[in-house]
Image (cartoon, coloured by chain):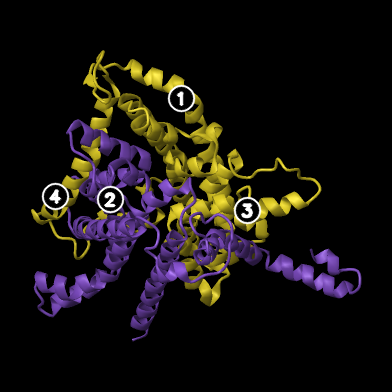
Chain colours: A purple, B yellow
Amino acid sequence: MTTLSAPPMPTLGHRASRWVSRNLIRIYAGLAFIYLFIPVAYTFAFSFNDAGKSNLVWQGFTLDNWKNPCGAPQVCHAVSNSIQIGVLSTLIATVLGTMIAFALGRHKFRGRTTTNLLIFLPMATPEVVLGASLLAMFLNLRVNPGFWTIVISHVMFCISFVVVTVKARIASLDPRLEQAAMDLYANERDTFRYVTLPLVMPGIAGAALLAFSLSFDDFIITNFNSGIESTFPKFVYVSAARGIPAQANVIGSAMFFIALFIVIIGQVVSRQRKKS
Amino acid sequence: MAFLHGATRNHSGPRSGIKSRSITPYLLLAPGLIWLVTFFIIPIFSLASTSTMVRPEGAQIGTYVQELRFQNYVDAFTANQEQYIRSFVYAGIATILALAIAFPLAYMIAFKSGKYRNVLLVMVVAPFFTSFLLRTVAWTQILGDEGPIVSTLKLLPFFDDSLRLTATPIAVVSGLTYNFLPFMTLPLYASLERIDPRTLEAAGDLYANGFTTFRKVTVPLAMPGVVAGTLLTFIPAAGDYVNATLLGNPNTKMIGNVIESRFFAVVDYPTAAALSFTLMATILILVTLYIRKSGTDELV
């Protein structure tokens, strides 16, 4: 591209090509970011499409979809299911996972290798296998899949991610802080409550957010273990064949901005804490 | 998984805050591990057991009894060889492409981003906040027959009306690459970020040129991230069927598609179970070999 501007002013062309080669990696990264954001931008843009039933071609701008996100049948039912499942699975997985993380990070015990393996394996297993095996068990036990089987499956695959996140936070703590508390005659329980837990809290919060987004976005495992129960990703998948309603784009975009907002708040808070 | 390594080093020697043997760790572990055993380990056995079942003559659809018929595996594999191999080929190509896109990106964030580092990291994860299915559906529409790209390309003289971008293997592989890109970028970033820029300067002081420094210093130090990133991309990509369904055609079906349709459309649980079990075993073997070969055992 730089050679185009070369003939009239060679020095400018030369400078331009030097700029390009020096910033090559930045240009490359810029292109990668554009690639990452194209579908997000598309989803956002088409949330304003005056689409009627099928949201395939641009028909004209409207705010109606944003004013009435539940306008399409079943969308809000699916979203509310996803939120309920997300909240329940996050709560259970965060509590169970944090307990395991503390055991691994703060205690000596036999069976550490087995525990680590048991945490690692679900992350190294493709979702389709996790989903299929759980469904095979439910079928063998004559359990009808539905809301609760989805929660069970989500907790199962979220625990490992919570353990990993919280454990990393525990490992990064300065042990001298706890020693100091002990030196100041805090007993074990108080040290944990007033020193260790607050220090680990950002890790736990991060793990909970991760668990919620994993649960909210999960499709494959959910599809296997949901029976006739609907979730937001399942709704999108099922309606993809006919063209998904613009309201789904509204919800997807809203989720995007809410999550971005939470992350930015988190970053600001942690920066201010570092300052003080 | 690269983010694991900081956390796993604490078994060496007693450290302050690590308490001596008592019942507490087991109480902490019990609920979570019981959950994992009940809903992960036992189901795997259930899957294994289903995989050798047989449907009795004249029985109702979906009724199977255990007959330890291991021939199921042979039948399932020979009938679906093509999709099986295709899954690993697609996942492999997608992993290489993701590495090629993510490495410069992670390198840039780790070394050239200055004060914008956190902003850029959030930007890597941000596309995740929109549902993964919505993004894939968006790709089907962007690349679709009536989408902006195909209609623009058709205006050019060297493409005729038969031009299609969706329903092709390329579309499926691009979809896989796209969806798992952040899984590649984050671990790469995590290990690149740990590199002390002074090591790179030292290489320069020892007369290594830029390329030699990159090859002999940067890449070996980034290896744990490369291993973690490729695993986090390859494993889910090999089992995925959403991209193949939405972006592909009947000739791009992957093993996940077969497992899903065997379960739900055909109600042939034993075949689905045998295929799932084979997929898991293959991946575990590949992962073990790969981790051994790349010498990063600290990953787990």
- Residue placed farthest to the top in the image? B57
Task: Compute the Cα span from label 1 to label 2.
Answer: 29 Å
| Residue A227, percent from left and from top | 27, 42
Task: Compute the Cα span from label 3 to label 1.
Answer: 33 Å
Visible residue check, residue A26: yes
Task: Compute the Cα span from label 4 to label 1.
Answer: 40 Å
Give neighbour class at mark 3: few <14, some 14-19, many 20+ (Cα, 10 Å): some
> Circle 1 is placed at which residue position?
B80
> Circle 3 is placed at which residue position?
B147
Contact, CB < 8 Å: mark 4 with mark 3? no
As drawn, the label of residue A154 is 2
Contact, CB < 8 Å: mark 1 with mark 2? no
Contact, CB < 8 Å: mark 2 with mark 4? no
Q: Are marks 4 and 3 on the same chain?
A: yes
| Residue A212, percent from left and from top | 31, 60
As drawn, the label of residue B30 is 4
- Residue placed farthest to the right in the image? A8
Dot placed on the residue nearer the N-terminal end, 4 or 1:
4
| Residue B204, percent from left and from top | 63, 64
Dot placed on the residue nearer the N-terminal end, 4 or 3:
4
**Up-down: is B20 above or below A174?**
above
The residue tagged with tag 4: helix, strand or loop?
helix
Which three-letter amino acid code belongs to the residue tagged 3? Answer: Gly
Which chain hosts label 3? B
Which three-letter amino acid code belongs to the residue tagged 4? Answer: Ala
Which three-letter amino acid code belongs to the residue tagged 1? Answer: Asn
- Residue placed farthest to the bottom in the image? A276
Q: Residue at x 35, y 33 (%)?
A: B264
Which three-letter amino acid code belongs to the residue tagged 2? Answer: His
